[in-house]
Amino acid sequence: MTNDVADAGEKLSLAQLEELISTDPERATEELRRLLRGDPLNAGGYRLLARALRRTQEDSAQEGLIRTTVRAADQLLMRAGQALEADDLETAEIILRRRLVEQPDDVDALYLIARLAHLLDYDHEAEELLRLAFEILPNFSAARVALARLLDKRHRSIEAVAELEPVLETEPNMIAQALKAAALGHGGEFDQSIEVYEQMLKTWPDEAGLWSTYGHQLKTVGRSEEGEAALRKATRMAPYRGEMWWNLANIKTAKFSDDEIATMLGALERNDLSDEDRWNMHFALGKVFEDAGDAAKAFAHYEKGNATRLPFMKHNPRQLTAEVDASARVFTREFFEQRSDWGAPNRDPIFVLGMPRAGSTLVEQILSSHPEVEGTKELPEIPIIAKALGRGRGIYYRNVAELGRERSVELGEEYLQWAARQRKTDRPYFVDKMPNNWLHVPLIQLLLPNAKIIDARRHPLACGFSNFKQNYGETGATFSYDLRQIGHYYREYVRMMAHLDAVLPGRVHRVIHEELVEDTEAEIRRMLDYLELPFDPACLRFYETERAVRTPSAEQVRRPINRAGVEQWGKFEQWLGPLKEELGPVLDAYPEAPEEYIR
């Protein structure tokens, strides 16, 4: 996408086109239409085209404003909406591009093309298009709600709440209020979030979904008994909604009665049960039977839950291998030596990364107990920067060589500014616990060369099975619903980290979960030495630290370390053959990398 347009070898910027509108609106209209045919997500282009058309048509609207004529959605836009629902993005783009080139102030079309932009991972463009839609029509509440949802997903949750306020003032509907409550929670304002849920439940006491999300929020802040009670109420109100049962099972300490188990098993016999309800029921029952000591029944339900959900996941093992291969080619020792003075010099961030379910939450909780370290959450900014760098050319490594030192500093500072908005204390260091950042360590090195990086690693069978039995959220670990895909993902992670150990020796500190469990104090001291922080006994009493924990390990990190989960996978080993086969030499070499990965 670009803001320039060519004409007979001449490129005109949006600023030049804006000037052209006043002198030659017809030519400006032609140029802007040409621009938008090549850049259909350009909100600024639509804004200027509307102005040029108004001038051309001698519209009576005041200069500088877009006319606010609104029509009901017609059949063409209905087709575009249906195409988006069917994931037929090409058809949707053709329809919407044609409509907006002719009618750039069509708010319905702008709303739909913003949805298209989001589906294509062009979230910045989606945001601008939605803002243009309610600039044209200020009371277009659907666009504001869509923008709030987009901002919340990008962890700009407090901004999302601000966008919802005008909607809630005029039409305080349940969807907007629920989004506000969720965004407040995502932004760390848990007391306010719980308060909104409690007010909503006074108005809509029969909404099972509200009781479920309310219960989940209570669990997050450590009020597990109250959370469990709310979630049980949700299951009684909606006994065939699988999500309610899984949310309850995901409170690791929850126990189920015979009647509750019978209800879930009976639900699976229904022909009208949706796929989503079915996989949630299976995952919940897997947890129930695992707790009861019946490994065979537990694995059968985990297997069915994964098999039901797998077709809905978008994970490409070949692409992952290609990314690791390319990183090994591009990010050499010489590459980093040539860029040793790149990036922002700040030492604030501590990145904790690795496989999901490998103990990263425990590491974060230990560090957050230190008086100089703040725990935040899984921050998405590094993946967002990586995605933006790769736009139009695929994987970001292809563009890194052209990045330039000045831009690396700007991006490092951009990350720090964004992270600052997520922080609640003035402690000098903070933890960014995004497990999948293992793929972006080279980018972290270029943007934040003085940041600390901790790789939390757990036995591949323990980690692999823990992922297999975890039913993640909508955008969770997409590789985790097939044992072979889990093994492949773990293998590529080890290969990537082995390469980084070779080209950036000593850069990454590794914490082996089993060693942390066996000799907790020694491993904590090693970790703090790496971070250049003094030992503090509070780190040994991490389970006393009061903070919100959003991950599936919330209950575990509020208890002292124990061995209960270290070899839990052993009861299921007979069914883990595909995982073992895919892991290959990585399994035998653990906790080291296979020799063929070490160059």
Image: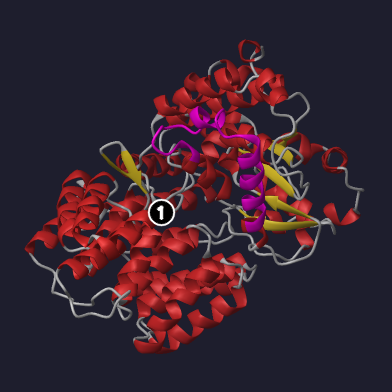
In depth, the one of 8 and 94 nearer the eye is 8
In the rendered image, which quarter contains the C terminus?
Answer: top right
Tell me if I can see residue 591 in this picture: no
Principal secondary structure, stretch drawn in magenta: helix
Q: Quick check: 22 left or right of 317? A: left
Q: Position of residue 137 (x, y in %)?
A: 29, 77
Tell me if I can see residue 302 in this picture: yes
- 109 relative to 163, above or below: above
SS of the residue under disc 1: helix
Which residue, as the protein is rendered here, is positioned at the far left?
75
In the rendered image, which quarter contains the N terminus?
Answer: top left
Which residue, as the protein is rendered here, is positioned at the far front?
23
The quadrant holding residue 551 is bottom right
Q: Position of residue 298 (x, y in %)?
A: 45, 44
Q: Which residues are magenta?
A: 389-417
Q: Position of residue 408 (x, y in %)?
A: 63, 40
Asked if the magenta segment contains residue 77, the reply would be no
Q: Position of residue 410 (x, y in %)?
A: 63, 47
In depth, the one of 132 and 441 nearer the eye is 132
* Residue position marked by numbered label 1 in the rendering: 123
- 353 relative to 119, above or below: above
